[in-house]
Image (cartoon, rainbow, N blue to C red):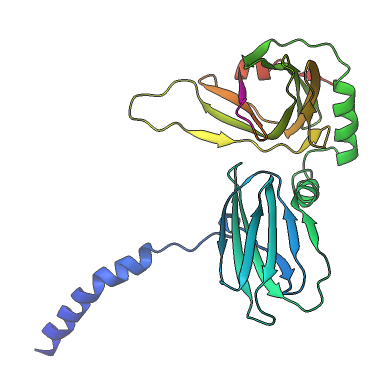
Amino acid sequence: MKKITTGIVLCALLPCLAMAQAIKNLDSSAQIVPYRIQISNLKTTVILFPAAIKSVDRGSRYVLAEKVKDADNVLKLKAELPGFPESNLSVITADGKLYSFIVDVTASLPYQAIDLRKQEQLERTEIKFADAGLNPNQVKEISAHITTLPAFLKDKDKDDMMRLKLEGIYMAKDVMFYRFRIDNLSQIDYTVDFTRFYVRDKKKAKRMAVQEQEIIPLQQYPDTNITINGKSHRTLVLAFRKFTIADNKNLSIELFEKNGDRHLSVNTDGNEILKARPVTP
């Protein structure tokens, strides 16, 4: 009788054991490492994000957060009370990025403004340039030189009196440089809010989701906010770690206007990427 009882118990536990074995642990590469930030109930901390803020989630109601009305990429933070326990903050921006923060309260605030655009440039310098064969100064110098070279590609998009054209692709060691010309045919200035680069299928079957892979630039030239004044043009160079794409895929490039709807896009394929011309570091 005891053997039967033991067998019944084991059979009852088997589904639980199987479920336990099916649970996965998060890999460290999937975890977003948070920034540590300090706030005060006496002073306001201002954070400048690389793109417009779409969502803010506070771990505690004592963390006061407010988006700036006329600057959609600026967030103001303050503590409602002094000395409350450590909390967290999550911010999602228009370029699809999630920023995670651990929030501490302090009576002596070491800073009052943070520019995450510069922080991201620093992190890309430390992490993404490690195996690219070029240092950040070399990438900047080559980008500036590329703006003087003749154009040899003709991929372009025209929308609402704006024109985006991919003029050339260049290679130096393991870094690829994409050069664009942006023409503003209108009288209204155009400020670039953010750019997106992603590889997607040229064609998709019905009821099939589009497969996309975002490509993140190593560096942009010029590295400041880009405004194309009315009736003028600007040249933009973006540097990437070397990559190629299959024949059935496109590289899609998108530009989004800050405080506007003049959205520009252009596609290029694997054959044109293979036409990349060498430049000397």
**Can you tell which quarter of the image residue 150 is in?**
top right
Q: Residue at x 85, y 37 (%)?
A: 134
Quadrant occupied by the C terminus:
top right
Magenta part of the chain:
260-265
Quadrant occupied by the N terminus:
bottom left
- The answer to which of 265 and 207 lies nearer the viewer is 265
Horizontal side of 185 relative to 84 (left or right) equals right
Q: Residue at x 64, y 54 (%)?
A: 67
Q: Is residue 135 visible?
A: no
Image position, residue 71 (x, y; %) = 70, 46
- The answer to which of 267 and 93 lies nearer the viewer is 93
Residue lying farthest to the left in this orientation: 1
Q: Main secondary structure of the magenta part?
A: loop
Q: Is residue 143 visible?
A: yes
Is residue 78 a member of the stretch shown in magenta?
A: no
Image position, residue 194 (x, y; %) = 68, 36
Q: How many marks?
A: 0
Image position, residue 66 (x, y; %) = 64, 58
- The answer to which of 242 and 57 lies nearer the viewer is 57
Q: Residue at x 75, y 63 (%)?
A: 45
**Can you tell which quarter of the image residue 223 is in?**
top right
Image position, residue 118 (x, y; %) = 80, 49
Say if 82 sits above or below 39 in the image.
below
Horizontal side of 76 relative to 96 (left or right) equals right
- The answer to which of 78 and 153 lies nearer the viewer is 78
